[in-house]
Every structure is written in C-alpha cells, then in structure tokens.
Image (cartoon, helix red, strand yellow):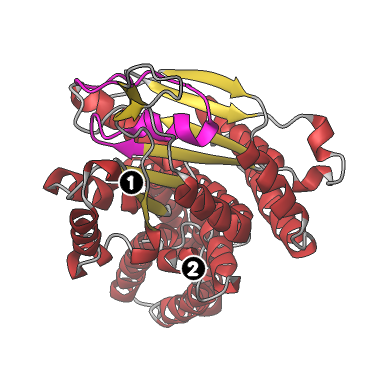
C-alpha cells in the first residue's frame, strides 16, 4: 500500500446547540466508573510506551502521544462517508446550522478531508467538571467513488481507522458499491449510522419502500434497523404563491425549506450520551493494539532472520554436555540453557504459555540426562536431542508470542474485551466482541 499523507483542513466552530446538549447530558452521568476505566486505559498507554521506548519508531511515539491526548481531552471523532453528491457536506452544514463547506450536484466538491471542531467556551462549562467535557470533531471526506486512485482510498481508510463513529450518507436505494464500502468500513469495528438523505425527493410511499428495503436480511448483516436515520439536509426549493392583501397581483417565488436533521441529531446524542466515552476508550485501545501488533511483528521478523542466538546457545550447550562428568549435570546444563533461551526469546513480550514452557524444560532436561549414559553413541544422541529441543522451543515460543499479541499485563486486546464485557447487552459495542 502506498504511503500517503493525509491532506486535511481544520476548522474550529463555536459552541452550538448540539455541543451544549452533550455537555448537559454528560454532566448528568455518573463519572466514577468511567474515570476508573479511563485511568486504566491511560496507565496502559503510558506504561507500554515506557517499556517499549526503544522498540517504537518516532512515528509510533507520536501516535501514542495523540492517543493519550485524545483520551485526556475526550475527543470524539465522527467521520462522514458516502458517494459523490449524496449530501455529506450538506448534512454537516445542517447539523452545525451554518455553511461549513461548499455543496454541489456535479462530481464531488469536497477534494480533501475537512475537520470541523466544536470548541466549547468556558462559560458553558461553569456547572460541569473538567473531566466531564466532551469535544466533537467531524471529518468530511471525499466521495468513495471520487476519482483519485489508491491514494484517495487509502486516506479515507485512515480517517475511518481513527474515527469513533461513522455516518454513511445515502440518497435512495443502496448501490452495490455502497454496500461494499460499508462492509469494508466495518472491519474497523466502528458504529455506523446509515443516513438516508434527500428524502424530500421521494413521495411518502417510495420513501417507505426504500426504508423497508434497507432493512432486508442482507442489509441487517451490515446495519441494524435502529441505525438507519431519515433526514433532508438541504431540501429542494419549492415554488410558493404570494398573495398580497393590498390588491397587488399575486406572484410565484422559490422558497428554500428548512433542513430537517433532528432525527440524526437525536440519534447521535443518544449514542454518545450512553456509550460515547466507552466507545472512545475502546477505539483508543484498538489503535494501541495495532501499534502493539506492529512492534511484535517486527520482533518476530527479526527472530526469523537472525538465527545467531540459537546457534550460539546450541554450541555452548554442546560443549557443556561434552565436558560434563555426570548425568545430573547434563540435565542441569540442558535445563539452564533452555531456560536462558526461553527468557531471551520472550523478553518483554506477552506469553500465554509460560507454565507450559517450564514443564517442557524440566521434561527435556530429564530426558537429556538419561541420554547422557557413558557411551559415545548416546553422547551424540544427547547433543542431537539438545539441538532438536532448542529448535522446537524456538519455533513454539515464536508461535506463542504471535498468538499472545494484545494480551498480558500491558495488552490492549485484553482490556478491550474486559470493557466490552462490562457494557449492557443492548450496547452497540456488543457486536465488536470479537477482535480478530
């Protein structure tokens, strides 16, 4: 995949009704369990960064700093996706109550990702604690079918990876490309609200038919009916006749109806009020898990390439066995060398089978001692056995480290699973229980 830099424009918007409503909603929530949970996530991030300081690249250090800042400031990122000319920017304009970006009917007007932030003035937070402040950040993306090749697609996926909630805007029956795009976005385990925009273009009966079609069995694998919202962000102008009371001739004029995005606003508020901060924590942990997996994969690749440690350990053990005068010392040498190898290979990385390796080391050492009977043939068999056991241990430990990614004391996966187990069964997060 090509390396791309996200081109973004960032805008800071004043406090709005939606942001103020969020403040009130969160000020009424019990903060104690959330603060404990957030403290666990924050400590995990800091401790992992400190332990793997040398293994992390400069870019990964910067990413961890951003994750920590996002968690501390309670920044919820909402990404808006959809095909060209479905009204993504119009939806944001209507939600914010002002024209944030251009809209148009031909091709795509949005040429790069635009970020709109709500900054809440301190006066609006007078009755709330600092820990309860929530910041919203909306990201307007290019159309998923916009001309731009792989780089455009890559940038959109990067936006999806870092977002906490996705709004997918459609304007009628879903196309195959839209269904494929939603399926692709779901690999990031983010809640998706399907926003049926431009409902004013359809008669009531057609609107109902499309809404029913969006709830068929195939679609419910992607989106549940509760996550489908009908709005009209920028209704078409309607012609109205003006009658004058003073006897002047009546005239027809075009009138722009007001947007109706209240159902979407209420759904966003409901979702963020009940699950916003937990969703933030899970997404921060998911991003940290990706970093942990990248660090572990580099270490495993290094082990595959550099086999000098295994060779040196084997040579040292073979010499020790040849010089050993007794059977019990053969077992001690073999057990000590194998223990050293296990410690060297595992190092800082989590292992789910440490007790298994201990038992194997004892069994291998005992058999090595038995093979040390005073004869030339059994000596060679003993050295061969020690070499095979080293190779076996190395292979299985590498496999264990691979399978243990995200677990252990500093494992992001383990904490994610614990958080999701703690949410109600009705939570939208329950669908993300499996992190494969």
- Residue 197 visible to the viewer: yes
Residue 53 appears at what percent x and percent y? 62, 36
Q: Nearer the viewer, residue 92 or 340?
A: 92
Can residue 90 be found in the magenta stretch?
yes
Relative to 428, is 134 on the left or the right?
Answer: right
Give the mark, 2 or 1, whose residue is nearer the N terminus: 1
Q: Nearer the viewer, residue 405 or 135?
A: 135
**Which mark lies nearer to you, 2 or 1?**
1
- Magenta stretch? 81-110
Q: Residue at x 53, y 70 (%)?
A: 354
Q: Nearer the viewer, residue 19 or 236?
A: 236
Q: Secondary structure at mark 2?
A: helix
Q: Identify whether 413 is placed above or below 261.
A: below
Structural distance between the alpha carbons of marks 2 and 1: 23 Å
Residue matched to label 2: 334
Q: Identify whether 272 is placed above or below 137.
A: below
Can residue 259 be found in the magenta stretch?
no
Q: Residue at x 67, y 46 (%)?
A: 21
């Amino acid at each position: 995949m090509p390396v791309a830099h996200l081109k973004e424009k960032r805008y800071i918007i004043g406090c709005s009704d939606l942001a103020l409503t969020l403040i009130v909603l969160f000020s009424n929530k019990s903060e104690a369990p959330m603060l404990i949970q957030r403290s666990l996530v924050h400590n995990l991030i800091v401790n992992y960064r400190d332990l793997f300081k040398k293994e992390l690249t400069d870019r990964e250090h910067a990413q961890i700093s951003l994750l920590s800042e996002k968690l501390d400031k309670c920044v919820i990122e909402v990404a808006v996706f959809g095909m060209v000319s479905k009204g993504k920017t119009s939806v944001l304009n209507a939600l914010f109550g002002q024209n944030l970006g251009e809209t148009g009917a031909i091709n795509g007007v949005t040429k790069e990702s635009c970020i709109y932030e709500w900054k809440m003035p301190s006066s609006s937070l007078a009755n709330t604690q600092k820990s309860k402040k929530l910041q919203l950040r909306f990201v307007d993306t290019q159309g998923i079918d916009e001309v731009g090749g792989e780089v455009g697609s890559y940038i959109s996926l990067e936006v999806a990876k870092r977002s906490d909630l996705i709004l997918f805007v459609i304007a009628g029956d879903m196309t195959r490309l839209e269904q494929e795009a939603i399926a692709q976005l779901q690999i990031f385990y983010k809640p998706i609200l399907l926003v049926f925009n431009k409902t004013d273009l359809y008669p009531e009966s057609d609107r109902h038919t499309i809404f029913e079609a969006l709830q068929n069995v195939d679609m419910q694998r992607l989106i549940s009916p509760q996550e489908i919202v009908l709005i009209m962000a920028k209704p078409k102008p309607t012609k109205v006749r003006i009658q004058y009371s003073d006897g002047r001739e009546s005239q027809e004029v075009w009138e722009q109806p007001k947007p109706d995005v209240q159902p979407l606003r209420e759904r966003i508020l409901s979702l963020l009020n009940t699950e916003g901060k937990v969703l933030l924590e899970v997404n921060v942990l998911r991003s940290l898990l990706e970093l942990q997996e990248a660090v572990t994969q580099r270490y495993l690749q290094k082990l595959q390439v550099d086999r000098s440690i295994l060779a040196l350990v084997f040579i040292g053990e073979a010499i020790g066995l040849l010089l050993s005068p007794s059977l019990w010392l053969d077992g001690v040498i073999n057990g000590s060398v194998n223990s050293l190898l296990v410690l060297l290979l595992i190092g800082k990385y989590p292992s789910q089978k440490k007790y298994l390796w201990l038992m194997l080391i004892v069994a291998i050492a005992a058999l090595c001692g038995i093979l040390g009977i005073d004869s030339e043939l059994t000596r060679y068999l003993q050295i061969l056995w020690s070499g095979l056991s080293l190779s076996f241990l190395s292979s299985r430990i590498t496999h264990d480290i691979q399978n243990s990614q995200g677990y252990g004391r500093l494992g992001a996966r383990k904490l994610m699973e614990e958080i999701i187990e703690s949410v109600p069964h009705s939570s939208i997060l329950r669908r993300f229980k499996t992190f494969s």
